[in-house]
Image (spheres, grey):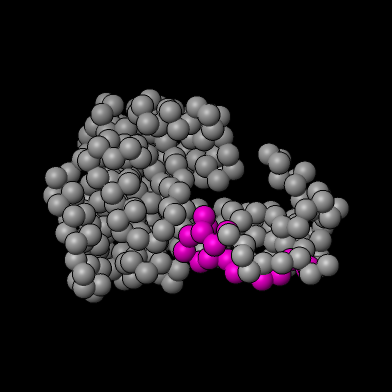
Amino acid sequence: MSTPATAVLAFAAGKFDRYAQGIMSLPLMKQLKDQVPNAECTIVPWNIPRQLLVNRAKPPFDNAELRRAMVLTLDRRAFIDILSEGQGEIGGAMMPPPGGSWGMPTEVLQKLPGYGADVAKNREEARDIMRRLGYGPDQRLAVTLTTRNAGGYRDAAVLLIDQLKEIYIDGTLNAIDTTQWYPTVMRKDYTVGLTVSENGLDDPDQQFYENFACGAERNYTGYCNAEVDQLIDRQSSEPDIAKRKQIVWELERKLAEDAARPAIFYPYSAACWQPYFKGHTMMVNGNYNGWRLEDAWLDK
């Protein structure tokens, strides 16, 4: 069902046993609970961050300083407060703790570019960069911001456009159908965009080889750094978990410095089911896993 309101009403009418596989927004969960007070719901961390896409080959966004300014204007906590009702995490490429095993702790993450807690200070630095590049209140940069026409993408994209205004960038939303979205980003037929990174595993190999290695199919921005590729191979072959984690964090630092594909935030999400649906445990680090349902039953 493409319309959430229709799906909630159908659930309330007892037409199906379960709603969402942990991809329901928290505001929608509240609507469902209003309709079905006896529904059982659970909230889990979502290993599917919203990410900023910048086409590094298209002027003026081929300028590293401009991309840095865009990262500095992000108010990640505002995304969480507005879109996820205050429940969510700030992280880098890897899912942050407690749900993730490889993400940086907050005190380490905040040392990376754009992750400092003082948003006003970050934005002033970003505006200084933009002014040096020739932009300002009377010389603004117009851009089309492309995203997939689905709630998880579109809602965050609208908020991103609002935050880019703080640094003299005026965005126009281009929300396109799913059938067009993936071909569009793979062809790099966009300038600025917002994506949702669908991570199947909380594992550095899946994340880095799939999204950040030179030439990877889902490396939508065309990011390529030989040093990063070497670090990806090093962490993959390191058997000691503690040593591997240090290499992963070095990778996180490099990706943040390069504004490779900045993670904006990690939301929490929900799933709800009828009281007679029993035996299924939601995963806390992979929303696409745990769905064989071999231990679930309907207690009718």
The residue positioned farthest toward the front in the image shown: 294
Residue 282 sits inside the magenta stretch = yes
Q: At x 34% / y 53%, what residue is drawn?
A: 207
Answer with left or right where residue 90 lies relative to residue 247. right
Q: In terms of image quadrants, where is residue 117?
A: bottom left
Q: Is residue 283 above or below residue 122?
A: below
Residue 247 x %, y %? 20, 63
Secondary structure, magenta segment, majority class: loop
Q: Is residue 232 visible?
A: yes
Q: Image quadrant for the C terminus?
A: bottom right
Answer with left or right where residue 13 lies relative to residue 162. right
Q: At x 25% / y 72%, what residue is drawn?
A: 241
In front here: 268 or 282? 282
Q: At x 47% / y 38%, what residue is drawn?
A: 161
Q: Is residue 72 above or below residue 289?
A: above
* Residue stretch rendered in magenta on the structure: 275-291
Tag count: 0
The residue positioned farthest toward the right in the image shown: 13
Q: Is residue 88 visible?
A: no
Answer with left or right where residue 154 lies relative to residue 16. left
Q: Image quadrant for the N terminus?
A: top right
Residue 100 sits inside the magenta stretch = no
Q: At x 46% / y 45%, what residue is drawn?
A: 196
